[in-house]
């Protein structure tokens, strides 16, 4: 018979209130550079449709079912069986808290409370909450390269849990971690020596330390965050900010180019900019973003080759390249989320959408809840059940997605999705609900309906991605990536009809994909799936198929799924035959070969 520890009883009792009754904990300090947009609380949004189904599967078939005992074992019996085993419980807490806040699922909440209590029970008196033995900690001894990294994820998980539950034990545990970090670095050793990849693993603790400062107002945590940025410039340090601000600065010149750790630092720099207002930090991040999107981003919304930023326009497609690490895709989404909120620029919403509908969900096997570590643009998908960084990262990005579907700022409601969905706002102290009934992803039409008990005045903005142009809302058309309906009084039942382009398009490749073409439908990048094309003979080499002509196909008559018919020839075939293309996110789910890029006509 299982019994609850006194700590678990304390936490479970304190957190017994239903999700709907809880509001997230507000920051204690005002930002020096306030964000332009604010994501909604997860509980204020409901996404239906294609993406909504993937989000639901992420909770019900992954987060709710994860065996958390192996994630806690390294804390109960130090050391763990991986140097980085400690990262996984924090990642799960982050994703599961967001998922619970979205769905209100009581079983997931009970699991959250139990895991948090069990994790905090292993924290030592000095605040240490890692999986290393006493003689190998924080890089003060050889072999502790991932200790600060794992504390980073515990901070992220516990602080997210605190934000949505208000539980004081989670904040107290986080503060003890923060206090220990402040006492250790740089007094005992440079933080650069406590993590791999020229220190970028350890310095990525920047993001949750900024969050800890925002929640508590304790200036020591802000000073520690500033110390991290100064440490970049130490001998053999990653020199992130100076490199990105220099003429020709690019991400492949930063440190050793390790994409996941670098993107994690860029997220932290964006958040530190918000609390300090130091313009150098935001400029460095924006320069990195521009370089990645211009030179190193796949059309499916990921980056990295062998987990690093490669050379300019070096974007190989096959399994051999170990491309599209799911940790990189997740952190790329997080960076774009931070920049969208901070600046309000639609281009960041475009990149979030690209990744969510393509690379991220291509890595997810929604039926089993498994994930791919890497997801190539041609080859086969390697889903696995192991405890890996990517298996723990992918669910975090999907759990974050509902908060990014609608955003707000004083008197402005921003619609960042064309999916059937519902969002609830408070505008001028009045409750407003926006309901969207959409034909997406099959038809280019949508209707927004406002529900409010009394008239309320606000401006309405709808993001207009390039694939959807021309997107119109009544007589209004897009500008700077948004369709804006000027401020007016809205009454219950008022509606706005949206029309947008939703059709197939051919994408001509360049550089690595010279003489190749790909197809897209709305935000979806498509792929030729060998298992869905019996005329192709199941050759196992769909990337060698040649498109017969450059006519753009139309959606197949069966609207239960997105499928296009394209005339192609196989490598040795003379006569053309029809091939079916489906979203990259769905291709190869049964283990069959697929390819995004096909030989051009």
Image (spheres, rainbow, N blue to C red):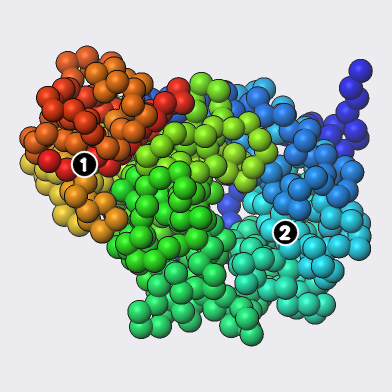
Q: Mark on residue 146?
A: 2
Left or right of 421, for residue 493: left
The mark closer to the camera, 2 or 1, is: 1
Give the secondary structure at mark 1: strand
Q: Residue at x 87, y 38 (%)?
A: 7
Left or right of 591, for residue 500: left
Instruction: Please give the residue where the numbered disc 1 appears in the rendered image.
Output: 599
Most foreground residue, 548 or 165: 548
Can the viewer see residue 370? Answer: yes
Pinpoint residue 503: horizontal percent, then vertical percent: 15, 33
Please identify the quarter of the rendering in which residue 310 is found. Answer: bottom left
Most foreground residue, 224 or 423: 224
Left or right of 214, for residue 332: left
Please identify the quarter of the rendering in which residue 454 is found. Answer: top left
Give the secondary structure at mark 2: loop
Q: CA distance from mark 2 to mark 1?
A: 43 Å
Most foreground residue, 518 or 455: 518
């Amino acid at each position: 018979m299982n019994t609850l520890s006194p700590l678990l009883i304390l936490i479970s009792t304190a957190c017994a209130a239903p999700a709907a009754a809880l509001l997230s904990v507000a920051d204690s300090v005002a930002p020096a550079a306030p964000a332009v947009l604010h994501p909604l609380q997860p509980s204020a949004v409901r996404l239906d449709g294609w993406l909504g189904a993937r989000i639901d599967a992420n909770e019900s078939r992954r987060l709710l079912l994860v065996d958390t005992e192996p994630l806690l074992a390294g804390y109960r019996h130090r050391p763990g069986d991986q140097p980085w085993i400690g990262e996984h419980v924090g990642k799960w807490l982050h994703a599961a808290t967001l998922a619970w806040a979205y769905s209100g699922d009581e079983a997931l909440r009970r699991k959250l409370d139990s895991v948090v209590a069990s994790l905090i029970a292993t924290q030592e008196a000095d605040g240490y909450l890692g999986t290393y033995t006493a003689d190998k900690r924080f890089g003060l001894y050889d072999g502790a390269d991932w200790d600060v990294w794992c504390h980073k994820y515990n901070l992220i998980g516990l602080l997210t849990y605190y934000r949505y539950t208000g539980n004081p034990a989670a904040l107290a545990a986080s503060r003890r971690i923060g206090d220990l970090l402040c006492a250790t670095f740089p007094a005992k050793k440079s933080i650069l020596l406590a993590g791999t990849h020229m220190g970028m693993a350890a310095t990525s603790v920047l993001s949750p330390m900024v969050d800890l400062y925002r929640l508590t107002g304790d200036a020591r945590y802000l000073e520690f965050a500033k110390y991290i940025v100064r440490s970049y410039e130490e001998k053999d340090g990653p020199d992130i900010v100076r490199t990105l601000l220099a003429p020709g600065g690019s991400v492949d010149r930063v440190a050793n180019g390790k994409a996941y750790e670098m993107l994690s630092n860029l997220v932290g720099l964006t958040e530190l900019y918000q609390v300090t207002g130091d313009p150098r930090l935001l400029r460095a991040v924006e320069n990195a973003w521009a370089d990645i999107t211009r030179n190193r981003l796949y059309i499916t919304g990921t980056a990295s080759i062998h987990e690093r930023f490669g050379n300019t326009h070096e974007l190989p497609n096959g399994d051999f390249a170990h491309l599209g690490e799911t940790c990189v895709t997740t952190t790329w989404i997080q960076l774009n989320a931070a920049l969208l909120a901070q600046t309000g620029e639609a281009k960041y919403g475009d990149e979030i959408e690209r990744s969510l509908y393509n690379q991220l969900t291509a890595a997810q096997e929604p039926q089993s809840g498994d994930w791919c570590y890497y997801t190539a643009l041609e080859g086969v998908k390697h889903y696995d059940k192991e405890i890996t960084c990517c298996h723990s990262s992918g669910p975090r990005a999907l759990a974050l997605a509902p908060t990014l579907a609608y955003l707000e700022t004083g008197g402005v409601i921003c619609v960042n999705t064309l999916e059937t969905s519902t969002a609830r706002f408070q505008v001028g102290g009045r409750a407003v609900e926006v309901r969207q009934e959409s034909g997406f992803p099959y038809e280019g039409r949508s209707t927004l309906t406002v529900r409010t008990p009394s008239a309320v005045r606000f401006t309405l903005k709808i993001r207009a991605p390039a694939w959807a142009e021309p997107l119109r809302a009544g007589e209004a058309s897009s500008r700077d990536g948004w369709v804006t309906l000027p401020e007016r009084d809205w009454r219950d039942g008022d509606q706005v009809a949206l029309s947008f382009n939703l059709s197939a398009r051919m994408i001509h490749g360049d550089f690595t994909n010279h003489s190749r073409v790909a197809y897209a439908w709305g935000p979806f990048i498509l792929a030729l799936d060998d298992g869905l094309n019996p005329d192709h003979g199941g050759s196992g080499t769909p990337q060698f198929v040649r498109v017969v002509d450059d006519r753009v196909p139309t959606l197949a008559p069966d609207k239960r799924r997105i499928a296009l018919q394209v005339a192609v020839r196989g490598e040795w075939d003379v006569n053309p035959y029809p091939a079916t293309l489906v979203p990259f996110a769905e291709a190869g789910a049964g283990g069959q070969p697929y390819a995004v890029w096909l030989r051009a006509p």
